Image: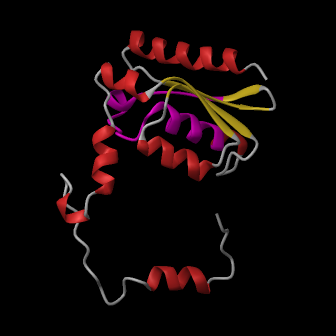
Amino acid sequence: MNHEAFLKRAVELAREGVKAGIGGPFGAVIVKDGIIIAEGQNNVTTSNDPTAHAEVTAIRNACKALGTYQLDDCMLYTSCEPCPMCLGAIYWARPKAVYFAAEHTDAAEAGFDDSFIYEEIDKPAEERTIPFYHVTLAEHLSPFQAWRDVDHKKEY
C-alpha cells in the first residue's frame, strides 16, 4: 500500500481547505483495499460544528459509504496527529491503522494546541475548567438495564 501517496492526499486536502476558507488546516482520507473510499476536511467554522474535524468528517463519510459504523478493514491517513476527540472517534470506528504526517506539536505551534484537553482529563471532574457535576438520580441506571434486557440490540 502506498502510505506516502495517501498521506500526501490528506495534506493536500488540508491545504485546499485553508485556501478555500472552509476550516482549519487538517485533512484525512480513509482507504479500503488500496482505494480511497472517503475524505474529510476540517470545516468547524463553516459548519458551526465543533466536532467537524477532518478525521471525524472522513469517518462519517466512510461509514455512510460502506453502510457500517465500524471501519475494521480500513486505514485512516491524516495530515496531523489526531486530537483527543478524533482519537476517541478513531477508536470507536476501529480502523486497522492510522498514519499521520505532522505531529501534535506542529499543530500547537500553528495555534491548535490540544494539550489542555489532556490535562483536563486528569483533573477531578469538579476542578476542570468547565466543571462537571455528578448528580445521581433514582433512575440513572435504567437506560443500561433496558439495554441489557432488550433482545434485538446490535452490540458495538
Residue, x 58% and y 40% (percent of image)? 59
Residue, x 76% and y 26% (percent of image)? 35
Is residue 41 on the magenta stretch?
A: yes
Say which quarter of the image contains residue 10. Answer: top right
Q: From what the image shows, is residue 29 above or below residue 134?
A: above
Residue, x 48% and y 18% (percent of image)? 14
Residue 155 on image: x %, y %: 66, 68
Say which quarter of the image contains residue 71. Answer: top right
Q: From what the image shows, is residue 145 above or below residue 120?
A: below
Q: Is residue 78 left or right of residue 6?
A: left
Residue 17 on image: x %, y %: 44, 17
Residue 129 on image: x %, y %: 18, 51
Is residue 32 on the magenta stretch?
A: no
Between 3 and 50, the one lying in front of the other is: 3
Q: Is residue 1 left or right of residue 78?
A: right
Q: Quadrant of the C terminus?
A: bottom right
Magenta span: 38-63
Residue 20 on image: x %, y %: 41, 12
Say which quarter of the image contains residue 147. Answer: bottom right
Residue 48 visible here = yes
